[in-house]
């Protein structure tokens, strides 16, 4: 079973081997807020090792039983959306990525109390995980209310950048879906521009309601409720992964400069 290559995160470029000449990935963000309570520490020590996702060749095999598909949520925060989707779709395997240990502890608490069996957790940066996943192995990806890094000098820290979209396009199955949501207008414009330019992704919107209103199976979170209480407008984007052959054709047909 292949493991996630932590050298992608921890090592500088070394030697002349192209496989080793990868830039160091810098993680920006918190890994711990308030100190974990004793019960939470016990869950991290005892439960997390049992459900930690180890990126096998077949992600569906990580759940110990057949699953209808595998969905990936990157940056699940407090885990409200991840848990709700897992409850609503018990035959779907859910992989949750979150380096913030307080969020991990909240999800572990629910998993332990409710006996939720279809969640696997990656308690670290999502980028090495994406590197490790096989081609066309994920049915759906969620990127919801990620840090918008609003200062212009920090825009490069945003998750929606070409290199990460290439990774997402590689791991998504043909016809798979990428869902993005944000309450930050500038980040929405940024994300829509980058997502629309990617030849492997097709925007599913046909009318304004498609990005103004959430999907039918949407799960509201406290973060969204707080954003709307402030008067912030939430935007919901859905993109479909094109068939591999069609993605190449779309790239050739794309007008110059786009």
Image: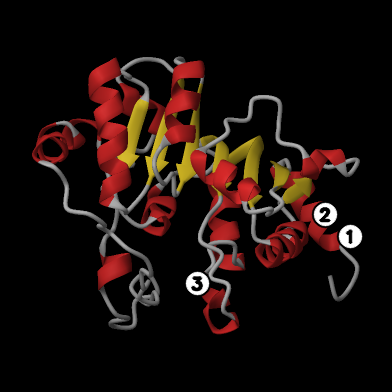
In the figure, 61 relative to 22: above or below?
A: above
Question: Disc 2 on helix, strand or loop?
Answer: helix
The quarter of the rendered structure image containing the C terminus is bottom right
Of the numbered discs 3 and 2, the one sitting upstream in the chain is: 3
Mark 3 vs mark 2: in front: 3
- Label 3 to label 2, Cα distance in Å? 28 Å
Q: Quick check: can you spot residue 54?
A: no
Q: Is residue 226 visible?
A: yes
Give the residue pinned by disc 1. 253
Label 3 Cα crowd, 10 Å radius (few <14 / some 14-19 / many 20+): some
Kindly indicate whether the residue at mark 1 contacts the one at mark 2 (C-beta within 8 angstroms). Answer: yes
Q: Indicate the position of residue 224 as horizontal and vertical percent values.
A: 58, 44
Image: 179 above or below 128? above
Residue underneath mark 2: 250
Crowding near pointer 2: few (<14 within 10 Å), some, many (20+)? some
Measured from the top left, where is residue 77 in percent x and y?
Answer: 41, 46
Name the quadrant containing residue 54: top left
Residue closer to the observer: 228 or 42: 228
* Spot occupied by residue 128 in the image (x, y as percentages of width and height): 37, 57
Task: Read off the residue under disc 3.
Answer: 157
Closer to us: 119 or 148: 148
């Amino acid at each position: 079973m292949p493991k996630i290559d932590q050298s992608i995160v921890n090592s500088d470029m070394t030697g002349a081997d192209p496989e080793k000449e990868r830039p160091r990935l810098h993680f920006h963000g918190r890994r711990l807020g308030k100190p974990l309570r004793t019960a939470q520490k016990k869950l991290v020590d005892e439960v997390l090792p049992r459900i930690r996702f180890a990126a096998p060749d077949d992600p569906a095999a990580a759940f110990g039983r057949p699953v209808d598909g595998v969905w990936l949520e990157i940056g699940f925060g407090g885990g409200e959306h991840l848990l709700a989707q897992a409850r609503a779709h018990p035959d779907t395997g859910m992989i949750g990525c979150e380096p913030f240990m307080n969020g991990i502890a909240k999800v572990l608490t629910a998993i332990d109390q409710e006996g939720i069996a279809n969640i696997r957790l990656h308690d670290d940066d999502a980028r090495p995980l994406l590197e490790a996943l096989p081609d066309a192995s994920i049915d759906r990806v969620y990127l919801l209310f990620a840090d918008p890094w609003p200062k212009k000098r920090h825009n490069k820290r945003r998750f929606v950048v070409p290199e990460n979209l290439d990774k997402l396009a590689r791991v998504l199955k043909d016809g798979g879906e990428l869902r993005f949501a944000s309450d930050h207008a500038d980040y929405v414009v940024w994300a829509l521009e980058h997502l629309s330019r990617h030849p492997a992704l097709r925007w599913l919107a046909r009318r304004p309601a498609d990005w103004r209103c959430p999907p039918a199976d949407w799960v509201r979170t406290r973060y969204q409720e707080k954003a709307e209480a402030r008067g912030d407008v939430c935007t919901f984007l859905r993109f479909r992964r094109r068939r591999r052959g069609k993605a190449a054709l779309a790239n050739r047909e794309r007008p110059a400069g786009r």
